[in-house]
Structures are given as C-alpha cells and as structure tokens.
C-alpha cells in the first residue's frame, strides 16, 4: 500500500482520548497524522472534503471469524479485511477458530505473513488458549505472543474445565496479553438455538437460558479476582451480565467486555417476525428487549467498554437449513457502526466503544492527534440507509438486511492509505 | 378460509378454526359410507413427506387425501440420512419439480414447514415440527371435545405431562385459548416450567388439582426414547405423581372426557382401566383425525365452497 499526503478537510473531528470535538483539518503523511489544525491552507496532496461528516479514530474489532486458513468459503483474510474497511475498521483481530486452529507460533506467523498483504483493515491474530480449541491442554501462549499474537482466546468456545481455565489465566498473565472469553456454558447451551424466554416458548424452539452466559460472567469475574489476569469478555448480552460487570468494575478488577452491535438493536422477537430466518440464529442469541435496553445503558455508562461486530460470515451451505441445523452466527463488520449509531444516539459513546476501548484492550491508542498512526474513519452520522448487499464479506448471513439504519461510512484510512471510500470523495 | 398453508394454530383465528371444524363435521360421513370416496380433489397431488417416524398421522393424512380422490405419494427419510446428503431445501426443490399441490411434512426441526411454505408455491401442512406445533392433531382434539361438550367456550381443559416439549399440547393451547377455553397444565417442573404461563395457560404441579374441575383431561405420552437427561427420575415416580388412574379419575366430574394423542404408554401416563374406560374418547379422536385432515386439504386446496358442493359430500 502506498501512502500519499492526505488532507481531510473540514470534518468534525471527534477524538475521545484528546477530548477534541470540533471542526478540524487533519493532515496525514507517511502513514501518520502530522497535523490536526483549525484550518490548513496547505493544498499539497490529496484533499478530501469531510464537511458535515465525523472524523474519528479507525475502529478495532477484537474477534472476527475470518476462517482463513481452512474455511475460506466463508471468508478469507482479503475479503475480511475489505469488509472491515467498508465498516470503518482499521484493525481486526482474527479469531483462532480456523482449520487448522491458530494454536502454534508457526500458525500465528503464517497468518500474519499473509495478512501483511491485505489492502483493507489491518489483521492481527488472537492465538488459541488451548490446543485445537479443545479446552484440554494449554497452547504455547508465550511463543505465540513472540510471533505476534495480540491476545489469547478460545474463540466462541467455552471451556468446560474450570481448573484449566484458572490455570490458563494464571499462565497468560506474565505475557501481558488479554485473555478473551465468551461467557457461556457448554451444557446449558447444548440443545438451545435461541434465547430462552417468551418468544422461544411461542415459536417452539429450544432455548438457551440467560443463566448460561451469567454463569460464564460470574466465573470470569471470580477468576479475574483470583488470578489478576486481564480478561476481556468478547460478547455479553444480558442485563444481569451488565450488573455483574458493574460490580466487578467497582471492585477494580481487570475485566473488560464487548457487546455485539446488533444486540443493541435486535431482540429475540426477530426469530418470530422473520419466521425462523436462520440469519437470526446466533451465539450468543438475540435476547429480550429488557436485556437490549440494559446493554445500551451498559455502553452509555461505560460498563460495557466495547461494541463488537461479532463477525461470523457463513454461506448458504451453512444457513439454508432448518433452524436447528443452521450454524449460529452473523456477519457484522459492514453494519456494526450503523447498528451502534441507530441504537445509541451519541457519537462519542459509539467512537469510544468501537475505536478507543477495543484498541486499549490490546494495548493500543486510537486517537486523532499529531504523531499518531493514521488510522481514521470518516462517516456520516445522520444519513439513513437501508442495509443491503452486495457485501464485501463472502457471507450471506446479515440479519439486519432490509433494516433502515443510521450512519454510513464515507472513508476509511489505514496507515495513511485510503482503504475504503468512493473515488469521487 | 383464505390461506395457503396450515403451519400452526398460533395465528389461526376463531372463525377459521370454526370453519375447519364445521367442514370436518360434514366430511365425517364420507368415512361411514360403503364407497368412502368423494371426487373433490381429483387430479390433485398430495405428497406426504415424513422425516420422522409416524404411523397414525401419516395413515390418517393418506386416507384423508385418498378419500378426497387426490393422488398421494409418500416420501420418508430419517433426518440423519438427509443430513448426510441432500438438504431439506434440495429435497423440496426436487419434489417441487414434480408439481405437487400440497405437501404434508413432519420434521424434527421447528420451523422446517415454515421454511418450505416461504419458498414454494404449494400448500404446506405441518404434521408436526420439532416441539413446535401439530395443528391437525389439535384440531381433531377440538372437534372431539366439541362433539361432546357442544362448545369450547368457557370449558376447562387440563393437559398433563411433558407439556413444554409437546407439539400436540402447544397446538392445543393455541387453538383452545383462541376458542375461549381455559387451559390448565400440570406435570413435572422440568416439563411444565412457570414460563409457560406466557402462552395463556395456568401452570400447576399436581394432577389432582387440575383433574378436579376439568371438562377434559388430556394426557400426554411420555416419550421415553427422546427425554433429555434429568427431565425426570423414573417412570415409576412419574406414574405415581402424574399418571391418571381410576382413583384420580373418580375425583373428577363424572362426565369428564379423557383424551390422549397416542400411542399410549399403558401403565405410565394412564392405567388400562382409564384408557379403555367409559370416559375415554381416544378412538373417537382417531376417527375425527381423518375428517379434520380431509377438511384441511379441502380448504387449503381451494375446493368449492361446501354449500355449493354438498352433493359431492
């Protein structure tokens, strides 16, 4: 990728870390931001008119399933990277849930080596916490960190063995990387295909109780206290989870959390309204409306620091099936900002949750300031659009398809290069 | 009735249910004749597509279609064998290519009939999808109740057993509450969770409590082969707490109706004396099944209005 001098002119720069919220010209050169000024007369380089738009630090997602290597019919590094760019993401941490699993330093290097060539969002790697994501034996966490992994995770899988999870956290702590966990419970989730509640009893599908997630949150909180390891809960989706987190944070425990953007907008009634559309089959499942309201509150007050795209692209092969046989998951990279803005009517909260907080989890600083890496997103926060394809992702499973949402990405810049944006802009 | 499919009773109106039951009543005499056939659906093709085992429902639908002179064609596969190869949608596309008029489907996955109904032009009749619905069974149950009680409005129906995982119970709950009946359910805590009250039923845990003032007691089959671990302890204990025997039945109203969707586990949910007793209408249910399914096929496939086609019936 070649980076030219770029002038983002007249946009509303919103940078939570520096406290900026005003109209500025942002000048980018050599992959870095070189100036954030009220008015720059310089016209040297490519000028992009950003009037009426928000200019913010690029977004970071901590757990996209890119399926590369091994499941590239779903997504690959290149399509995932482009989908991320289209959604305003400049960094994507890919989940180790690949085939083979990214559970060795060689696998980390292999993916990072190929990821260097992508032309959309930057791709980082989370190494598997346990070998083969089997929850039985620890992976070489230290060597994977040396190879460049930025976090450890068992993807969507919940470890059944509590003693091993406790040791994994103890073991990971000195390497300084966060351990990302999806709070859940294998046994309670085994036969369920949606949230257990009024809607599941109406549509006759087996439910997953909210308690499955809440047990996972309780366990993570207890282990963060016990081990002192940094824990990031990659998907929290219930009102009680938010309460549990609130208490853990008051106590000062090193625990952060993310909510999938669509869970701020959609509820389990979507399963009914769509008449068993398998795009609504998710893990964690869409919850009740009172959960949804609590999640929005959790993001607004900062209890849930991050909003994730929770990107799990799947194909017709995996979704054009009976509801209970369809694979759980939905795409999200290209709709996360719109979902978040539609649910949370506050640009600052959304930017904090999509850019600043997730970058912070992996030890990075997402800011618009002189000297910073030029990872920038420009978006229109008020335009309404109807979600529709074609998508850059290879997936077909976008449950928000057809919804009218707020906000649209205009331009994404990574390392000073335009990775997404209409040519005319 | 103006609908393409019969997927469940949850969204079926009181008027529609009444129309189906009235139509079924008029079809009932076809099965009493020596020549048990009317030409109503001559030239139409009805496919029975059973992805789960079934004896009586399948036979009943098959007979219903044949007594209406439709051509019938059966297709069955265990869902595991189709999981190995062809998807449900592909199987359906193949059936579609043969131009059927209606498909009667039973499937282990809730929503499978809905998926076909959305994708194809022919009528879909749900003959049981997972734990969701079994509308024709509930309709034949309601017809049987109406025969004896005259109306469903204001009547009390007790459903006992694994209500939560029973598609028969769920369709009955939707249909009966629409028709103005009160439904009370009882069973083990794992099978009658308090959350069932969202469906508009009263949840109790003692069979004696629900049998006492019921007009109808519907006993559900314990599907021992399908129970997940921990749903109940032993069959003996189940029978002791939730089985219907003569002692319990004697505390009920004398004219109470005893029903069961079959097949019965004699000695588990119901003692033989009760199953064969004078209050039992279990075999009437089976007879009504054919009439109700004839009515459904007739109404969905757009037969002539009953009034104008009375001679055919």
Image (tube, coloured by chain):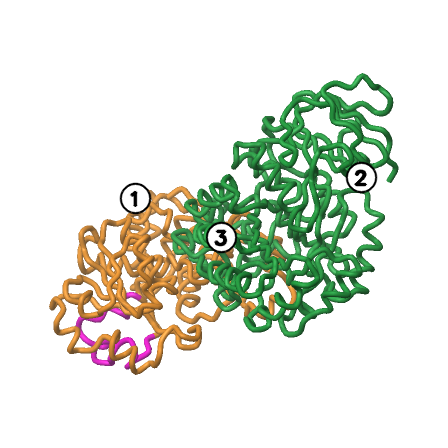
Q: Position of residue B98 (x, y in %)?
A: 60, 55
Q: Earlier in the sequence, mark 3 or mark 2?
A: 3
What chain letter is assigned to the residue under label 3? Answer: A
Q: Residue furthest top?
A: A41
Mark toward the viewer: 1 or 2: 2
- For image coordinates 47% across by 71% down, the residue present is B53
What chain letter is assigned to the residue under label 2? Answer: A
Q: Are marks 3 and 2 on the same chain?
A: yes
In the rendered structure, the colour chosen for chain A is: green
Magenta span: predominant SS is loop
Residue at disc 3, secondary structure: helix
Decide if residue B102 is in sight here.
no
Between A290 and B4, the residue placed more toward the observer is: A290
The residue range painted magenta reads B264-285
The answer to which quarter of the image holds residue A84 is top right
Mark carried by residue B15: 1
Q: Is residue B112 magenta?
A: no
Crowding near pointer 1: few (<14 within 10 Å), some, many (20+)?
few
Label 3, on which residue? Answer: A245
Q: CA distance from mark 1 to mark 2?
A: 66 Å
Classify the position of the C terminus of chain A by image quarter: top right
The answer to whether B85 is drawn above or below residue A411 in the figure is: below
Residue at disc 1, secondary structure: helix
Say whether marks 3 and 1 touch (CB < 8 Å).
Answer: no
In the rendered structure, the colour chosen for chain B is: orange
The answer to which quarter of the image holds residue B284 is bottom left
- For image coordinates 72% across by 43% down, the residue present is A83
B68 sits to left or right of A337:
left
Residue at disc 2, secondary structure: loop
A234 sits to left or right of B1:
right
Q: Position of residue A323 (x, y in %)?
A: 53, 56
Label 2, on which residue? Answer: A415
């Amino acid at each position: 990728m070649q980076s030219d001098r770029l002038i983002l002119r007249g946009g509303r720069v919103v940078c939570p870390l520096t406290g900026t919220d005003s109209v500025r010209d942002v000048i980018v050169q050599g992959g870095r931001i070189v100036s954030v000024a009220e008015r720059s007369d310089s016209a040297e380089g490519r000028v992009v008119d950003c009037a009426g738009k928000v200019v913010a630090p690029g977004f970071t997602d901590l757990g996209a399933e890119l399926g590369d290597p091994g499941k590239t019919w779903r997504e690959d590094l290149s399509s995932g990277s482009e989908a991320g760019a289209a959604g305003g993401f400049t960094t994507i941490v890919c989940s180790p849930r690949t085939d083979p699993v990214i559970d060795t330093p060689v696998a980390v290097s292999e993916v990072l080596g190929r990821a260097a060539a992508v032309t959309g969002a930057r791709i980082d790697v989370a190494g598997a916490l346990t070998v083969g994501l089997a929850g039985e034996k620890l992976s070489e966490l230290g060597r994977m960190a040396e190879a460049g992994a930025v976090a450890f995770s068992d993807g969507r899988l919940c470890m059944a063995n509590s003693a091993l999870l406790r040791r994994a956290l103890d073991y990971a702590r000195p390497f300084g990387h966060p351990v990302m966990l999806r709070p859940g419970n294998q046994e309670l989730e085994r036969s369920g295909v949606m949230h257990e509640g009024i809607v599941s009893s109406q549509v006759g599908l087996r439910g997953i109780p909210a308690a499955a997630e809440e047990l996972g949150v309780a366990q993570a909180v207890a282990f963060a206290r016990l081990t002192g390891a940094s824990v990031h809960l990659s998907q929290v989706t219930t009102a009680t989870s938010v309460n549990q987190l609130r208490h853990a944070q008051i106590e000062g425990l090193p625990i952060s959390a993310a909510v999938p953007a669509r869970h701020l907008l959609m509820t389990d009634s979507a399963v009914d309204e769509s008449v068993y559309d398998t795009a609504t089959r998710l893990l964690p499942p869409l919850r009740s409306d009172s959960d949804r309201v609590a999640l929005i509150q959790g993001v607004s007050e900062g209890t849930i620091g991050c909003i994730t795209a929770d990107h799990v692209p799947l194909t017709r092969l995996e979704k054009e099936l009976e509801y209970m046989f369809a694979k759980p998951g939905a795409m999200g990279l290209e709709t996360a900002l719109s979902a978040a803005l539609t649910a949370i009517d506050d640009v600052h909260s959304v930017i904090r949750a999509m850019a600043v907080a997730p970058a912070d989890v992996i030890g990075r600083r997402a800011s618009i300031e002189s000297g910073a890496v030029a990872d920038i997103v420009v978006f229109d926060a008020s335009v309404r659009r109807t979600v529709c394809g074609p998508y850059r992702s290879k997936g077909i499973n976008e449950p928000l398809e057809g919804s009218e949402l707020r906000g649209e990405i205009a331009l994404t810049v990574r390392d000073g290069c335009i990775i997404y944006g209409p040519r005319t802009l | 009735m103006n609908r393409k499919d019969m997927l469940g009773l949850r969204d079926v109106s009181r008027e529609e249910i009444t129309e189906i039951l009235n139509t079924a009543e008029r079809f009932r005499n076809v099965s009493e004749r020596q020549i048990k056939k009317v030409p109503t659906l001559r030239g139409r093709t009805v496919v029975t597509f059973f992805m789960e085992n079934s004896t009586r429902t399948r036979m009943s639908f098959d007979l219903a279609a044949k007594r209406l002179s439709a051509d019938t064609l059966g297709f069955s596969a265990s869902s595991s064998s189709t999981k190995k190869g062809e998807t449900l949608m592909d199987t359906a596309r193949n059936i579609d290519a043969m131009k059927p008029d209606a498909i009667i489907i039973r499937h282990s996955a809730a929503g499978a009939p809905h998926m076909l109904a959305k994708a194809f032009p022919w009528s879909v009749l749900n003959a049981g999808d997972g734990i969701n619905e079994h509308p024709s069974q509930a309709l034949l149950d309601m017809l049987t109740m109406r025969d004896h009680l005259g109306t469903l409005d204001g009547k009390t129906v007790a459903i006992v057993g694994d209500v939560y995982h029973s598609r028969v119970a769920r369709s009955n709950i939707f249909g009966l509450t629409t028709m103005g009946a009160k439904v009370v359910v009882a069973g083990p805590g794992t099978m009658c969770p308090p959350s069932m009250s969202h469906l508009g039923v009263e949840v109790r845990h003692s069979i004696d409590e629900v049998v006492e003032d019921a007009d109808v007691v519907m006993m559900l089959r314990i599907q021992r082969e399908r129970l997940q671990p921990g749903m109940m302890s032993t069959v003996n204990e189940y029978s002791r707490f939730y089985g219907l025997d003569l002692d319990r039945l004697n505390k009920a109203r004398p004219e109470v109706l005893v029903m069961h969707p079959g097949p019965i586990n004699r000695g588990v949910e119901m003692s033989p004396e009760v199953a064969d007793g004078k209050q039992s209408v279990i075999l009437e249910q089976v007879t009504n099944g054919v009439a109700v399914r004839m009515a459904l096929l007739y109404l969905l496939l757009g037969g002539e209005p009953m009034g104008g086609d009375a001679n055919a019936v």
